[in-house]
Image (spheres, rainbow, N blue to C red):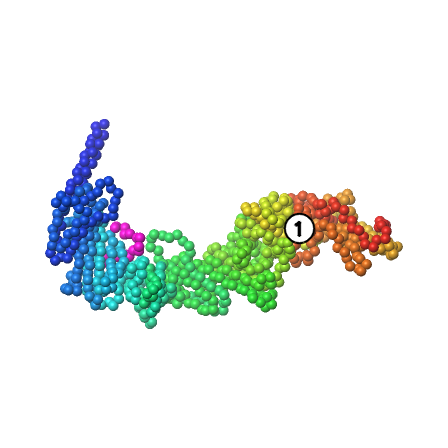
Amino acid sequence: MAGLHCGVSIALLGVLLLGAARLQRGAEAFEIALPRESNITVLIKLGTPTLLAKPCYIVISKRHITMLSIKSGERTVFTFSCQSPENHFVIEIQKNIDCMSGPCPFGEVQLQPSTSLLPTLNRTFIWDVKAHKSIGLELQFSIPRLRQIGPGESCPDGVTHSISGRIDATVVRIGTFCSNGTVSRIKMQEGVKMALHLPWFHPRNVSGFSIANRSSIKRLCIIESVFEGEGSATLMSANYPEGFPEDELMTWQFVVPAHLRASVSFLNFNLSNCERKEERVEYYIPGSTTNPEVFKLEDKQPGNMAGNFNLSLQGCDQDAQSPGILRLQFQVLVQHPQNESNKIYVVDLSNERAMSLTIEPRPVKQSRKFVPGCFVCLESRTCSSNLTLTSGSKHKISFLCDDLTRLWMNVEKTISCTDHRYCQRKSYSLQVPSDILHLPVELHDFSWKLLVPKDRLSLVLVPAQKLQQHTHEKPCNTSFSYLVASAIPSQDLYFGSFCPGGSIKQIQVKQNISVTLRTFAPSFRQEASRQGLTVSFIPYFKDLPPFPAEEGVFTVTPDTKSKVYLRTPNWDRGLPSLTSVSWNISVPRDQVACLTFFKERSGVVCQTGRAFMIIQEQRTRAEEIFSLDEDVLPKPSFHHHSFWVNISNCSPTSGKQLDLLFSVTLTPRTVDLTVILIAVVGGGVLLLSALGLIICCVKKKKKKTNKGPAVGIYNGNINTEMPRQPKKFQKGRKDNDSHVYAVIEDTMVYGHLLQDSGGSFLQPEVDTYQPFQGTMGVCPPSPPTICSRAPTAKLATEEPPPCSPPESESEPYTFSHPNNGDVSSKDTDIPLLNTQEPMEPAE
């Protein structure tokens, strides 16, 4: 306890002593005496007001005042009425130097009066030097040199230098500077005004600069910037960000060691409205045969310069009514030359058309530390952080960069067709030119924009190696991939990302597309031989109302050793409204394809229209139709022959998009000899039955030649057995073979009875299922029309078997059943034309 009381006593004593000290400091008397003819004026005035409870005053002879001015030859004693006068008052010490009526006091500038004699307030020393127009004055700054700052910036230590010049009676602000920079000298003509601001707590007692006499510089000012090693400097034109004086000239001199290289980049600039002359920048570069080198402010500025150089800004005669503003902020970067800076790379684009190549920095996080610049130079002189090369010319470029991985390339090329008669069946290779691959910068994107005449031609992409579609289940692991997307501005359709090593043989697209080769690893240069697409212009896909034709058709030839994953376009956003896409999937003769969907339901909810999926065998024409917004997606199913998968979207409601993922797996086909024998015997019996039916029909026709047209014709593709007969063999959609019978429709068997007396056919007005009539193996199945197909119809009545190959093919005969909806339950009998008597059953 005694120790605790002792500690409290010491703390209280410290507070009392501190209070006494501050009270004594507030009541301390200050004496300022200025010699005669010193041309010095001291002004103590209120600074920025602060929110304090009590005001503070300057006390002179018991008088309380808020401003005190002491002129040359005067002596004043004063105190402050508060404990912390630095929170209330500031002090300005200004010295006027007249070099027009007498000699200038050249040399090092002293702080007068000494800071030890001044009260501890924020202090500003001002030197106002007036000189003749023909006299140049030079401010020389000792180490540490100065660093220019822009508006709104502040110096870390609070010490700032504000420098201004004169043009007749007009004051021109050269700039505000901090310590620790590269500015070593500033030359001005016709006088200078220098202000040094020191915070009250800063112990500095020297000015840090000297004044020297120089001959006329015939311009507003010259700023010298000295680099002793790698570094950068940001500099601004006079009066920045306000306008540069009209028709004036300002110069920056840069001192750079011979073993380093300097590059200039403009950070910000504005142009005024010129009546005469032209605003420009001029460079004096050592070794240049065209000095001065003149550039516009909007041009790429020089880089990779060795040794000292000058940069000048020249104004113009401005429009008096609307002068505008000329201003410039730029950066000079000095660094060691890199190995690549001495190498010249030739990029020959003289034989290319509608192509541009851009080299630019990779997006990276900014660092507070000094980072050497990374520039690309055209003809070894015009350097910038990014450079765009256009087709039709040969370009020579070099690099001034410590790490070329900080840069990458993006290339765009347009291949367009304006005359469909000329372009049809023409092919173009989509390959990266070798000149681009030889550059030491990584290729990021190479985009081809492929344009075709509207409603005239379409496009087909054929890869050098079959492609794999990138999915989460089987991602691409190559160093590059192709991104295929629509190039129609109003159409948001992204077909997908594809890489070599898959099963997609070709991609057909309806209209304009963009193909982008994107690299992911430096190993692309080693794998560049694998890249290569061929695009061909083909006849246009016709539209089939009420749905548009396929926007894309993917030809897939699966590999027997791996599973193929496929997904609908716009995977992240859903298939666009009223868009149809097809997959043409080939199945070898000795293989069975297992089709598997990775959802139970599609999840799409239609606002207008219907969403459909059609699975169609290309040989047998048997097809299944699924309503994606109502039906359950099919379970794993087998296909013995090549087949189509067509997906057509409706106009879905917001948040309920259509995206489907499915796979195709091939397994060897196994055939049982017993099944083959049964198939042969069954085929023979069916053949004899068919022959008997033909003979019967012929005899019946002869008997009734005067009774009207025949009631039936033989169709070799129709099964003569009724589907409702007891099944001898287990039948299912999964075991289709070559002996497949089409649907027996009344309108097909008895269609000839609809002929009128003139021989033409009358079309019956019935709602029946219309089977696909297109050419098999060439065109995808067309999306169903609302008037011809029941939207929820599904031709397979049995549940698909699991995705595992059967032990043997025990069902050589299958039927493609008609629609089991309302259509089959209606009376489809059609009145016969010219019928004399009722039909008799066939014998």
Give the left or right position of residue 555, taking residue 700 as reference: left
Callout 1: SS: loop
What residue would you read off at disc 1?
A: 786
The magenta stretch spans which residues?
141-158
Q: Residues within 10 Å of mark 1 (few under 14, many from 20)?
A: few
Q: Position of residue 587 (x, y in %)?
A: 65, 53
Kindly identify the amino acid type of the residue bearing the numbered disc 1.
Ile
Foreground residue among 80 and 206: 80
Residue 177 makes an appearance in the image: yes
Foreground residue among 612 and 270: 270
Q: Residue at x 47, y 55 (%)?
A: 521
Q: Residue at x 86, y 51 (%)?
A: 837
Name the quadrant containing residue 285.
bottom left
Indicate the quadrant containing the N terminus: top left, top right, bottom left or bottom right. top left
Q: Position of residue 113 (x, y in %)?
A: 15, 53
Q: Position of residue 100 (x, y in %)?
A: 17, 64
Q: Judge whether 605 appears above or below 241 on screen.
A: above
Residue 314 makes an appearance in the image: no
Name the quadrant containing residue 633.
top right
Foreground residue among 339 and 281: 281
Q: Residue at x 86, y 54 (%)?
A: 707
Q: Residue at x 18, y 40 (%)?
A: 22
User: Is-magenta flag for residue 762?
Assistant: no
Q: Position of residue 818 (x, y in %)?
A: 72, 48
Give the left or right position of residue 410, taking residue 580 as reference: left
User: Is-magenta flag for residue 155?
Assistant: yes
Give the left or right position of residue 625, taking residue 77 as reference: right
Characterize the magenta stretch by its predominant secondary structure: loop
